[in-house]
Amino acid sequence: MPESAHTTHDADEDARNRDILIYVNGELVHRDEARVSVYDSGFLLGDGMWEGMRLYDGEWAFFDAHMDRFFDSCRSVSLDVGMDRDGIRAALEKTAQANGMETDVHCRLMLTRGVKAKPFQHPGLSRSGPTLVIIMEHSKPVNALQSRGIRLATVPQVRGLPMSQDPKLNSHSKLNCVIACLQAEQAGADEGLMLDPHGFVNTTNACNFFIVRRGEVWTSTGDYCMNGVTRANVIRLCEQNGIPIHQKNFSLYEAYGASEAFLTGTFGAQTPVAEIDGKPIGSGERPVTAEIQRLYKEMVAQDVAAQSARRAAPADSRTQP
């Protein structure tokens, strides 16, 4: 990646990450010693699902929404998680506590179909149960991106139809997005803006995409993009706070003429877009984006506080209607 390039996952270096412990199937292992088998279905085939989450003040923001997506994805490909969501939460807490982590933490939760008896495709060759890995890092998005913004390039790689590989599956098979990222880099941009199979603006290789036109927020129909938790939260915030929001088909013509554009994702929340295909977006003033960022911070704080209150309540009171 060129030195001038940036991504929505840019973070300041944190020396504490040099000695983090990684969760591997119930064991906590120093990052330098964490291993999975070369026969693991995730390594061999990209056969697995993952989830990215953020830890704030001891709570995983929007935990239920992330677990809904994770378990739905696993169910859709007949991948047995091997535990319920309480088991996942316990594994997350075990890892966070072992690393002394409380806030400004990013987690990548990964589940594969497990070790195969032979290095071939058939799922029935994965006979020993799933592989669960949790990587947590002290990680906070760099502030510079909020003023600088991300540079996008429209790439030839598109988001496919659900009958090829449904983009809603947050799978280990990310080659489609990796190719888009490479194409953007080769075009001198930070991330790739991907179109849908019909040529409408869809998403980037790593995040969901929004534009602002005449005070209205637009995003894709959602038919061909990742069903992002942050995307859904931004749509909900707009609906609840009188900000016009449309999920619709729109073209590059309308994206180029936007007054603002931003990306959404669990790590970066809302990241402004500075330009698309070398064309500056708007004047650099981003009042709608700033308001959404403010509302989103409040939403995170409310969710974290609600989770903390529920978990602090006596066990018998949690079951009351």
Image (cartoon, grey):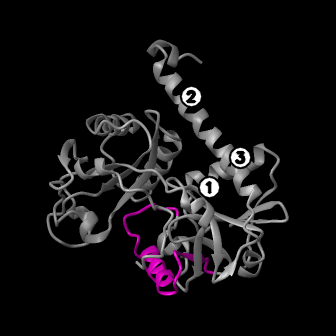
- The residue positioned 18% from the left and 47% from the top of the image is 29
- Looking at the rendered image, the quarter that the N terminus falls into is bottom left
Q: How many marks?
A: 3
Q: Earlier in the sequence, mark 3 or mark 1?
A: 1
Per the image, the residue denoted by label 2 is: 306
Other-residue count near label 1 (Cα within 10 Å), few / some / many at <14 / 14–19 / ≥20: many
Q: Secondary structure at mark 2?
A: helix
Per the image, the residue denoted by label 3 is: 237
Q: Secondary structure at mark 3?
A: helix
Q: Which residues make up the magenta segment?
A: 168-197
Q: Earlier in the sequence, mark 3 or mark 2?
A: 3
- The residue positioned 41% from the left and 70% from the top of the image is 174
Front one among 115 and 205: 205
> Relative to residue 130, is residue 35 drawn left or right?
left
Per the image, the residue denoted by label 1 is: 231
Q: Amino acid at mark 3?
A: Leu
250 to 139, vertically: above or below: below
Task: Determine the CA span between mark 3 and mark 1.
Answer: 10 Å
